[in-house]
Image: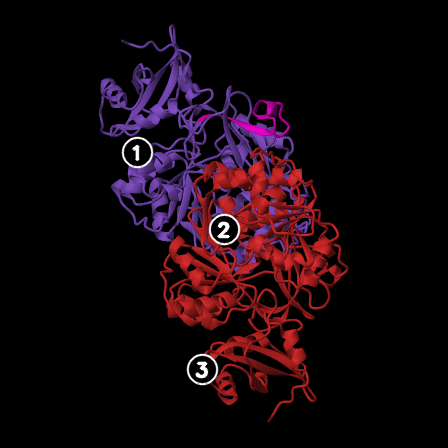
Chain colours: A red, B purple
């Protein structure tokens, strides 16, 4: 067989040849939506490659992006790796200290920054050690005042650049294409490098009928940010398959998301549960036409069953839960049905939807504890480990590599069970698991159950120290606007569903659960705040 | 990223874990249909690997198969390559001379032969130089009498073997997995070797929504033989996705094919046009319920438009034309629609269906003539060339490699045009093209048009020598049972559709068009028979 390398470059060639008129729909401000045919998009991508090359980008150069989801970011998604360089997608929600760290650690030489995000980064500039050029991405050619010498306008650079650029087709497929950093429990974020091979295979996985099944006639809207694990691979796969892309830009709200779904007839969209909780509330208040949607994909943290039910039963939209991490490019599994479930009851099907799903082809997942691989019984807990061609094998120049990567596997730090059908169900993070009297209690199961209560908006369950049982569960609950309930009512609501010793010892009502930059519950902070909590009983 | 190799082995692990109860439905004789759950299938595959190993199979050993489509052949499809050896699928329709050549040339050490095919091979046995063991595949444990010393019963070997076999997971993904020989115009057949990497990527391509879109809930029936280019990759992909497989066994007829579609609720099936012509005739006479079919895939040679129309309009079954060769694993392109065609007229859509389709992801196709890459105008002819990760780069130990493989491309010997939408339309084989007065005439276009005439069953158009124009087209026509027409009527039928100088100079009516072992028109034979033909006019 030919030694043709698996390169993102082939995606650009394909979209230009077969889907030149299909659109990238890019919202860059509340008033501006660009509608760019792929043939124009590919030209602009080649111009960007020329512009970056003229500023010193070579094979292996790190180019940072600090940007929302829009067509310029998508241009960088291809111009940088297809030229043999590496796009470092910086998470704009990191703390200034972490932003400085990741840019210096990756050794970014050029930064592509959204005009409206420049103020966020401005104070960090004096601490950046390797950055030589900053390029401002916005609709006009203005550049902000800055003491930094080399600040360029993206549109001016493109206007001055040729659209003739030969992306090399002879790169080794293991060449790094992109990188993202993932927050660590303690210490600085950890870097993950994505290769062309990994991204190409991941894009194929997203096109499989039994996974996301992305296809040419899809209109794909990634709500998940492009600075977060390749926006779950959708921008890459959409170019490969010629899907219309809707990139929602800055400052999107539930209302805007629903407007875009209705106006652009979005068929597939994806984001974290927090987003869909907001969208569900808005849709119940002001319904839009969402009949174009064939699938909403939800990941990043556990999806409450009530949310899944709302989308599937009230809005008639399949709601697919996915699982992945920064270390996994990220798609590992999706809660799609198999034909054996056709005759199941709605409740049984909902239980499957609420799992993290079935592992996609080419990846291998195992849940292991001291006794080895756990049985597929839906009960025995163990740690989830993963291997496969789009799974990282290290943290970039980081000694913490050995904590997660062992014996050819990525150890996820997630506690899971495996259902009879082989579906993964995350029950906890290793560090969030509640160890009561030598037994394990899943905080996530309790949270999901609490969040199906009609008065509960959000719930986090954490371990608090206990003299006799070592740890006991404590529920932290945020109520829906205008709703009320009591500790007693919530505990009795849980009673039928769990063993008695699983029930939280107490319920704390609060206004907000602290969250990470990507919307996950920050349980470490909760535990810290509540470490001296004494159960009143 | 992890260096996980792309191996067929991962398919077996997957089907055993996620789809243990799904079925391989295998017809081994007119009275016998086996229904084997995948969990049992994988066990038998491991037993086969043990049995073959005990007979001397090592990494790199060539194991030949000489068999119909059934579960034992499917067991060999995985047991041999997953153990690191190479399955040589021998085309049972080759001449005895060619069969001897390919088995000796590949250096097969073990042969897996269907009991009912043994007589076909028996006389060849004394000429086989490398074969040490012959294994008879049939439902019972009998073995035929033979002067060859080591003839074994497949089922007896399996009964005596352990189902514990560790398929290696550390093979290089470029390791050869299979091989097939393709007939040459002159001389002995040419061998093509398939690697694990190529077969894995090809299997992914078959699962993409925009190609065949194979998925778990499909019931896949390959009519194309498993001794012919990996049965177009369907057996491999079906195991990967956990599809139910229906393997129709020996001596199938149009009537049997329709019975299986109806009884097993087949959703996808594939074969050459000759098969579907027969099936269409049978379905018109004795209609079965074919409503389970979501797609019939047709390839191997050009599909007459009338046939496509019959399936799509009369039977309401999408009829997808594909293109591929032994050298291409084989899927290169499929005539699926894109969303831009939604509003097209039925005639325009039929024209697209009748092309060889749009190239699947990861492959690169170009049509080139002396002026370079031809424009996408649907008119300019050139030779089709292909490259990509499941395209061969040589003929196995064969000097003819340099005839087809040049500058990193496979030159197909097919003359094609490219439509505005980028779809490939084969207009001829290089050697079948009619060169009249310095211009090219497509024999395939004329044939397709003739075959839409209500009296015509089959038509082949060939070049006959001509004093003034060098070559002129001659139509060879087989009429449908009970139908009649004349030369004049057929020529006038073509008149509106082609330039005057394209029209055949004459029509010869015959009882049968000579065909190759895989059902393609044998035009070389026709040309030879008619080389002295004088146009009567």
Q: Position of residue B192 (x, y in %)?
A: 58, 33
> Mark on residue A178?
none
Q: Position of residue B38 (x, y in %)?
A: 52, 56
Quadrant including the N terminus of chain A: top right
Tell me which label, 2 or 3, sits earlier in the chain.
2
**Comparing marks 2 and 3, which lies closer to the viewer?**
3
- What residue is shown with label 1? B306
Q: Is residue A3 above or below residue B416?
A: below
Check the image and name the residue furthest to the bottom. Answer: A537
> Mark on residue A208?
2
Q: Residue at x 48, y 45 (%)?
A: A241
Q: Is residue B500 magenta?
A: no
- What residue is shown with label 3? A483
Residue A356 in sight: yes
- In this view of the protein, which residue sits in the foreground, A472 or B54? A472
Instruction: Identify the subunit bearing mark 1.
Output: B
Quadrant including the C terminus of chain A: bottom right
Report which quarter residue B181 is drawn in.
top right
- From the viewer's perspective, tell me whether residue B264 is left or right of residue A124: left
Same chain? Circles 1 and 2: no
Separation of marks 3 and 1 at Cα, in angstroms: 66 Å
Instruction: Identify the subunit bearing mark 3.
Output: A
Residue B243 in sight: no
Secondary structure under tag 3 reads: loop
Q: Which residues are magenta?
A: B394-416
- In this view of the protein, which residue sits in the foreground, B397 or A105? A105
Q: Label 3 crowding class (10 Å Cα cut-off): few <14, some 14-19, many 20+? A: few
Q: Please report contact status of discs 2 and 3: CB closer than 8 Å, yes or no.
A: no
Secondary structure under tag 1 reads: helix
Q: Position of residue B345 (x, y in %)?
A: 29, 38
**Comparing marks 3 and 1, which lies closer to the viewer?**
3
């Amino acid at each position: 067989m030919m030694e043709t390398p698996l390169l993102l470059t082939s995606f650009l060639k394909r979209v230009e040849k077969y889907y030149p008129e299909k659109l990238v729909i890019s919202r860059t401000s509340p008033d501006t939506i660009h509608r760019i045919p792929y043939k124009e998009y590919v030209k602009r991508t080649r111009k960007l490659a020329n512009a970056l090359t003229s500023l010193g980008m070579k094979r292996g150069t790190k180019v940072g992006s600090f940007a929302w989801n829009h067509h310029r970011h998508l241009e960088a998604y291809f111009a940088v790796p297809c030229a043999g360089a590496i796009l470092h997608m910086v998470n704009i929600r990191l703390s200034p200290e972490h932003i400085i760290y990741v840019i210096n650690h990756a050794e970014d030489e050029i930064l592509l920054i959204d005009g409206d995000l420049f103020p966020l980064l401005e104070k960090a500039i004096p601490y950046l050690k390797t950055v030589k050029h900053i390029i401002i991405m916005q609709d006009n050619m203005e550049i902000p005042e800055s003491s930094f010498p080399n600040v360029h306008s993206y549109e001016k650079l493109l206007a001055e650049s040729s659209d003739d650029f030969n992306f090399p087709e002879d790169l080794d497929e293991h060449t790094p294409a992109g990188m993202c950093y993932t927050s660590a429990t303690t210490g600085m974020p950890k870097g993950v490098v994505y290769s062309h091979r990994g991204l190409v295979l991941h894009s194929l996985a997203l096109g499989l009928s039994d996974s996301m099944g992305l296809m040419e006639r899809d209109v794909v809207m990634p709500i998940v940010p492009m600075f977060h694990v390749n926006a779950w691979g959708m921008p890459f796969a959409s170019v490969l398959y010629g899907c219309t892309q809707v990139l929602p830009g800055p400052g999107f709200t539930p209302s805007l998301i629903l407007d875009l779904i209705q106006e652009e007839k979005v068929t597939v969209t994806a984001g974290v549960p927090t987003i869909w909780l907001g969208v569900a509330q808005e849709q119940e208040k002001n319904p839009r036409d969402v009949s174009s949607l064939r699938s909403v994909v939800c990941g990043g943290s556990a999806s409450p069953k009530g949310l899944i039910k709302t989308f599937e039963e009230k809005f008639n939209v399949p709601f697919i839960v996915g699982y992945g991490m920064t270390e996994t490019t990220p798609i590992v599994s999706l809660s799609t049905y198999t034909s054996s479930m056709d005759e199941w009851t709605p409740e049984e099907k909902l239980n499957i939807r609420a799992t993290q799903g079935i592992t996609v082809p080419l990846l291998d997942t195992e849940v292991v504890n001291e006794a080895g691989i756990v049985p597929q019984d839906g009960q025995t807990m163990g740690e989830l480990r993963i291997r496969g061609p789009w799974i990282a094998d290290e943290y970039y120049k980081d000694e913490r590599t050995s904590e997660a990567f062992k014996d050819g596997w990525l150890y996820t730090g997630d506690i899971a069970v495996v259902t009879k059908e082989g579906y993964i169900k995350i029950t906890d993070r290793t560090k969030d698991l509640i160890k009561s009297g030598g037994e394990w209690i899943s905080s996530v199961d309790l949270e999901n159950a609490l969040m199906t209560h009609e008065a509960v908006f959000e719930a986090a369950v954490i371990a608090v120290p206990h003299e006799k049982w070592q740890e006991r569960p404590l529920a932290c609950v945020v109520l829906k606007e205008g709703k009320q309930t009591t500790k007693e009512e919530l505990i009795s609501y849980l009673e039928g569903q769990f063993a008695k010793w699983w029930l939280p010892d107490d319920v704390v009502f609060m206004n907000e659960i602290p969250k990470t930059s990507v919307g996950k519950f920050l349980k470490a902070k909760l535990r810290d705040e509540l470490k001296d909590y004494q159960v009143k009983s």
